[in-house]
Amino acid sequence: MKIENAKVLNYQLHRHYSSGRWNMGKDSKNGSFYKHVITTLDGNKYSFIAQGHRQYVYKEDTFSFEYEENGFYNNIDRESIVVHDKNGVRVWRGYAPENVPEITKETIKYTSTHLYEVPQYATA
């Protein structure tokens, strides 16, 4: 099912499980898997599991997503999340720049401005 233009009432993060032995027992926020639980304004809870603690949606944002019901849980398809900030501009959160689709790198908006150089191709 699909939800359009939802607003966030509450956003919670819970560590699902640690990333493994490679971190030698140190707490690594980027390597661990977190359960992201989003409560929308209509009171429904939706969740997904992602690597890292970065928040995908903030309270002033509107977002759309697809989900499937799994018993008592509403599981969000993480790849289907589309977020727009309070000005209506599409933003990507929770992703590292190298994981963002190539076509969006020149128009991507972060909290600080990132400018990507567009390669100039030689013409024959």
Image: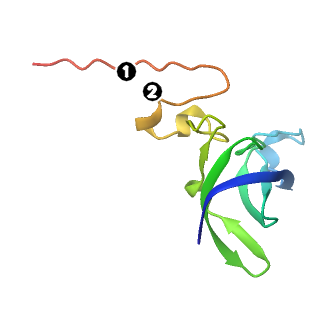
Residue 16 position, x and y percent, is: 83, 58
Question: Could you tell me how far apart the alpha carbons at marks 1 and 2 are, in whole angstroms?
Answer: 7 Å
- For image coordinates 67% across by 26% down, the residue present is 111
Residue type, label 2:
Glu
Residue 33 position, x and y percent, is: 77, 52
Residue 28 position, x and y percent, is: 83, 39
Residue type, label 1:
Val
Q: Secondary structure at mark 2?
A: loop
Mark 1 near mark 2, Cβ–Cβ under 8 Å? yes
Query: Relative to 90, does residue 39 appear above or below in the rendering?
Result: below
- For image coordinates 80% across by 79% down, the residue present is 72
Query: Relative to 104, does residue 123 appear above or below in the rendering?
Result: above
Instruction: Decide if residue 39 is on the left or right side of residue 108.
Output: right
Query: Relative to 100, does residue 9 appear above or below in the rendering?
Result: below
Instruction: Decide if residue 51 is on the left or right side of residue 107.
Output: right
* Residue that numbered label 1 is attached to: 118
- Quarter of the image that includes the N terminus: bottom right
Q: How is the image coloured?
A: rainbow
Looking at the picture, tell me which residue is in the foreground, 27 or 9.
Answer: 9
Looking at the picture, tell me which residue is in the foreground, 58 or 119.
Answer: 58
- For image coordinates 65% across by 39% down, the residue present is 93
Residue 32 position, x and y percent, is: 79, 48
